[in-house]
Image (cartoon, rainbow, N blue to C red):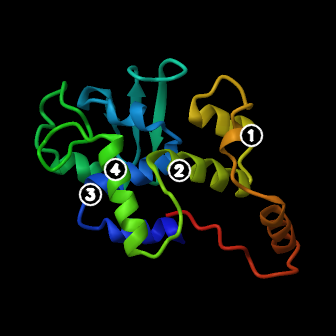
Amino acid sequence: EEFDRFMKYFSDSITLQAYLSLAFESLGRPQEMLFTKISDLELYDNYAIIHVSEHGKEGTKKLISIDSYPYLIKMYNSHKDRKNNDSFLFLNENNKQLTPYAINKRLKKACKHLNIDKNITCYSLKRFGVTFRRLNGDSDVTIQRIAGWTSTKQLQTYDLSNQDDVFKIELAKRGLIKDVALKEH
């Protein structure tokens, strides 16, 4: 629900919507995503692959864009320098590389405006994505592969779910309570 509110709040910035949705879906680290260039983007009819070759903590990997694809393609189509393969994929309003600091600043402002009493950062999106995937039944190995990790040990750090979350999901699976609202964006 909060993620949807952020997406609506940033409806005036396709770049931030693309970043938020891609970070949530691909479980990409901010540095990996923000250092990608146009040449790292591989577009298809209804999905995209972004090759991470720089600033990857665990080496090279691929970020997937399926649910985030509508935002990504809209951002790409409006990209001021998309013909330049060396241009950064995520640009700010001045056509310079977008930074985690700038995004975090906008997220802080959004939290205040939306009355969300949390410290949301670029990195929070990855944690939310991991938690969402885990609570929706994705296997640990699937999450590991999507995140590009070498093992599943990082799940302990990134999964924000708790016993109550899992209990509610189990009750919903058995029809004892209404479905738990685990909506994706």
Locate the N terminus and report the quarter of the image it occupies.
bottom right
Q: Secondary structure at mark 2?
A: helix
Quick one: 158 or 180, which is closer to the camera? 158
The residue carrying pointer 4 sits among few (fewer than 14), some (14 to 19) or many (20 or more) residues within 10 Å by Cα, namely some
**Amino acid marked by disc 4:** Ile
Return the residue at label 3. Answer: 14
Residue sitting at x 40%, y 20%: 53
Q: Which numbered disc, 3 or 4, marks the residue closer to the eye? A: 4
Residue sitting at x 76%, y 82%: 178
Q: Which numbered disc, 2 or 3, marks the residue closer to the eye? A: 2
Return the residue at label 4. Answer: 103
In x, y percent, where is residue 92? 20, 46
Residue 161 lies in quadrant: bottom right
Q: CA distance from mark 1 to mark 4?
A: 26 Å
**Amino acid marked by disc 1:** Gln
Position of residue 72 relative to residue 107, above or below, is: above
Marks 3 and 1 close (CB-CB < 8 Å): no
The residue carrying pointer 1 sits among few (fewer than 14), some (14 to 19) or many (20 or more) residues within 10 Å by Cα, namely few
Q: How many marks?
A: 4
Q: Earlier in the sequence, mark 1 or mark 2?
A: 2
Q: Earlier in the sequence, mark 4 or mark 2?
A: 4
Residue 124 numbered mark, or none:
2
Q: Secondary structure at mark 4?
A: helix
Q: CA distance from mark 1 to mark 2?
A: 15 Å
In the picture, measured across the screen, residue 100 lies left or right of residue 131, that is left
